[in-house]
Every structure is written in structure tokens, then in C-alpha cells.
Amino acid sequence: MEQQNFKKYFIIYFIVFGISISLFSALSTYIIRINDIEKSINTKAQDIFDIKTKTILIPAIKNMNDIVNSLRENEIVKDFIITKSADKQKGLEELFFALMGIENRIMKTRIIDKDGKELIRVDRKNQNGKPFIVKSSNLQDKSNRDYFQAVSKMSKESIWHSKLDLNIENNKIEIPYNPTIRIAAPLLKDDEFIGMVIVNILTKELFDAIGTSSSFKHYIIDKDRNFILHPDETYSFSKYKNLKRELKEDFPNGLNAKGVYAYPIDYILKNEDEALFVLKATDIYEKSLKDEIVQNSIIVLILTVILSIIASFYASKAPAQLQISLLNAHKKLKEYTSVIDKYIITATTKPDSTIIDISSAFTNSSGYSKSELIGQKMSVIKNPNRDKAIIRDLWETICSKKIWIGEIKNRKKDGTEYWLEQHVIPILDERNTISSIVSIGIDITSKKELEKFATIDKLTDIYNRRRIDEFLQIEMELAKRHSQPLSIILVDIDHFKLVNDTYGHQVGDLVLSQTTKIISQNLRKSDIFGRWGGEEFLVICPQTNKNEAFVLAEKLRHAIETHEFEKIGHKTICLGISELEHDDNEKTLVEKVDKALYEAKNGGRNKTVIFT
């Protein structure tokens, strides 16, 4: 009897002792993790700053510098600034015109002589407008401008950056606002200043790319504490909009406060702004970190208590051994809950893709709660625009009991898309049949956004000039290697300038986006489509001769001709076609299609012409 009572009291004692240990462990975990929040936010901020600067800002500024350097080193530029010959001037005007046709971010390209007088200026009225050569009677004296004074004193290899400001047209800030930077380089002969080249470049796309993330509010602040970039676009470029926004309204405790991370970027933008890139952790992000800690601590507590109760029934037989096992289990449990659940996007499904378990990281990435996902098919996060061939390959691999690795586009609860790089693993039972499927993913949305920024035209959502040039080189090489036909179609919207002049640029942008949508819907899967510049588009047609391309071009022309555009009614296009010949290179192939398009325009428009 005494032995039984001793055993009973020992079990009760062990349970109480286990619960006490569990409470102490959970509390300790909570305190440690709370102290780690600031470290986690700091690491996250540094990661975002590195991504935004190293993969976006620095390459973008380098690209701008390269444009100006290439002009400075151009032989025609060097000859003209010395000789001022009419032939060289014409050649330079054509060079600037072509450059701005390719790079629609460039708003103005100029050469200024040693006395500050503009010798050549090529402008455009807006980002989608065609460049035009400014008449000599409208060229201006810039000798009193700060930038002329600064550049005229620079050494041979120097590059000058203006402050980040807003584009000005006719002495007024252009609306809608267009962030702009001016980049200039001196022209020297025998170390003596003889002139300068200067380019005005729009930076809106750059600001869009570096201006947001899900965890922080993004700011760029100049040395005078004016906002260049602000989460509320109203206060971006506050100085130039004559808006007063005190720093303390956004940072009551200053830029050194907890949750605020300021990084100098004057080593990238070498201008008078002496700018800081500032990240401020959002309340939602900080709350989500604290909530995760509380939830994990509660889970650790509950599961440890349960383990303690179960273990207590066997404690009288081997208390020391069980105590060691319990501590080991507790350690493993903490590792699992704090690392795997938080950081790894995992899901376990039945063979028919019904979700039976997910990690917290999965809910964070998808926007759904656990209760909303358990019991649903994985198609709940399916993006309707995902590549069906990828999904087909995934299921074929899984059904063959192999691991599938690849990238999948998904859709969050709020409708936004996100990308996962996934390992999908079939789990086999003792009969060698698939009992469940485990997927382990990494969020690569930021990587995909960077890829898109580098290759996709923002307005039309098709390939940009740089990317379509790359495809053209690749397809030409393939066509020559395999002796296959290749044709290209150059498309131009008839009288597009009239749309901008009559209805405004917003309607013009609408016509551009609707035109690309119609063309995209009528192309074949093998065709490659991109924006060539302004209102011109290029279609690359692999394994297609010029007669077959003509059939496709006429289909496109008819589709545009019969479409009724919003506000402007009907519109037409001209199309030129050229076919790759054995001795063609990229330049000659494009020259041929350009001549064919020119003939179509001069032949009455709304027409398709094959180069012969």
C-alpha cells in the first residue's frame, strides 16, 4: 500500500515538476526570441537594402553612366566639338535620334560647347513620344547653369550626376510627375575643356523597383531632410512640389530609432543630394514576428506538458532515463517549431493534392490561414496564368515516383502572384505506392520581379527592346545553324502622334496597351513579340518564310483594323516583313524590314509590305 502511494505521489510530483520545467522553458524561449526580433529585423533590412542596391540601383546607374561615356568616347562627337562641321552635326543628330528611339527613358540629349552654348539638342515630349531635333534658333545658352560650371572644371574620366528631381517641360514641372536625373561628362582636348555631353534620363521605373517591399516602408532622404522617395507618393520630391513634410512626422524618434535603418547611397548617386536610403519596419511586420514567437512558445509549452504527463506514467521505472529522453525530445521539438515551421514553406498532401498539413511559412507566403487551407486542393493557390506544361511535367515526374524540382507561379489570397522554387517529393508506403506528397519551397518572387524589370516593357507588359534584341540574335543563329527560315515583322501604329496630340498621352498609352493585347492574342506560340520603340513593335517568326509571315501579318492588320478602341474608335497599322538570307546579319535584316515598313507607310498606310 505504501509502495503504491509512493508511486502515485512520485507521478504527481513528476507531472508538477515537468509542467514547471515546461513553463520555465517556454518563458525562456519567449524572452530569448523577443530579444532576437530586433536582430531579425536588422538582418532583413540589410538583405532588402543589398537587393535593392546591388541588383537594381547600382546596375541602373552604371547603365546610365555607360550611355554618357559611350557618347563622350564617340569619334563623331569628338570631331564635331572641334570642327563644328555640318556633316558631323547631321551624323550626331541621327546618332542621338537613334539612341533615344532605343532608350525611351532618355528625354533629352545635348552637346554644349566650351562657352555654354547648346550646339545639338534632341528632345522628346514624353516617354512614349518620338524624339525630335530642336531647331538651332531654339538652342539656349547654359553658361550660367550650375551643372555647366561644375562639369567644365571636371577631369577627363569624371561623370557628373544631378540631384534627383522632377522632369520640367516649358519651365513647368511635368504632370503626371516624372522623376529625372541628368548625367553629364566633360569633353577635353589636351586636358583643356572644350565642351560637354549631357543626357536627361527618366527614373520612374527605377524608383518603382526600389521603392517597395512587404516588410518595410521605403524612403530616400536628401542632406536637407527633404523626401525624394516617400511611401505616400504625394510627399515624394516634396521640395520640388513645394510641400513641407517634417521628418518627425514619419520618424518621431529620429533616424536612429529602433526599427529604422538608414544607409548612405552617395557612393552610388554621386551628387549633391548626399542621400540616405531609409527602411522603416511596418507595424504589421513587427506584429507578425511577435505573434509567431507567442504561437511557437505556446506550442512548445502544450506539447512539452503532454509529453511530461505521458512520460510520468513510466517515470517510476526509469526516471533518469526518461528525463534525458524528455529533454532531448524537447530540444528536437524546439528546433522543429522555431526553424522548420517558420522559415520553410512546406505542404503535405494526399495523392489527389488535398492538403493535410502546412507550415506557418506556407500561410505567410500564400496569405491564407491554416484553417482555410487544410482539406482544400493545392489548386486553391493556383495562378490561372501558370504554364500548363510545367504542371504536366510535375505530375508525370511525381507519378513516376521521382522528385520534381522547378519554379511555379502561384496566387495569394489577395490575388497577387508569387513564385516558389519547389522540391516536390512523393512519399511511398510499404507497398511502394504513393501515400502522400511533400512539397518544400523557397519564395523567389523578388528574383522574378528583378528578371521582369530587366526584360519586360512596363507599359505594354511585353518584351522590351533589350530582350527582343537578344531573342533576335539567338533565333538568327539557330536558323542559320539548322538551315531553317526566319522572318521578322515590324509593326507601326498609323498616325499615333495624332492620338497623343488630340486625346492626350493617357489615351495614347491605352491604345499602345490594347494594340499589344490584340497582337498577342493573334500570334502563334512560337512567335516572339516585343516593343521596338515608341509605337513600333517587332514580331520574330521562327521557321517561317516571308510568304507565311505575310499571312500572319495580314491577320494582325485585320484584327487591329476591325477593333474599336476606347475613345478614339478605329485605328490601323503598317507592317514590314523581311526574311533572313544567308549573308544577313542583325543589322541588315533590320534595315530590310525598316525599308519595307517605310514603303508601307508611303503606300497609303494600313498595309503590309514584304522587302524584295
Image: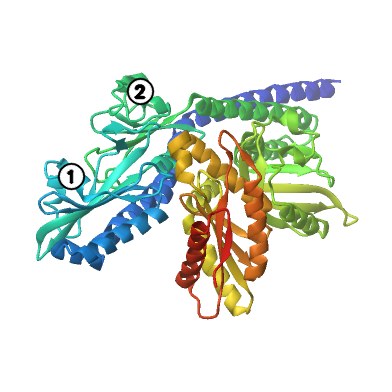
Q: Nearer the viewer, residue 460 or 239?
A: 460
Q: Nearer the viewer, mark 2 or mark 1?
A: 1
The label on residue 140 is: 1
Picture layout, residue 183 above or below residue 91: above
Category of crowding for the residue at label 2, using alpha-carbon neighbours closer than 10 angstroms: few (below 14), some (14–19), many (at least 20): few
Question: In the rendered structure, which disc, 2 or 1, sits on the residue that comes first in sequence?
Answer: 1
Q: Pinpoint residue 558: horizontal percent, then vertical percent.
A: 66, 51
How far, Cα to Cα, is label 2 from label 1? 43 Å
**Element marked by disc 2:** loop
Pointer 2 with pointer 1, Cβ within 8 A: no
Q: Label 2 belongs to which residue?
A: 251
Count up the numbered dots.
Answer: 2
Q: Residue at x 29, y 31 (%)?
A: 172
517 lies left or right of 179: right
| Residue 249 in the image: above or below residue 240 | above
- Which of the two residues, 30 or 467, is positioned nearer the viewer here? 467
Q: Secondary structure at mark 1?
A: loop
Question: Residue 202, how many percent across, how many down?
Answer: 36, 43
Q: Quadrant of residue 203?
A: top left
**Amino acid residing under circle 1:** Gln
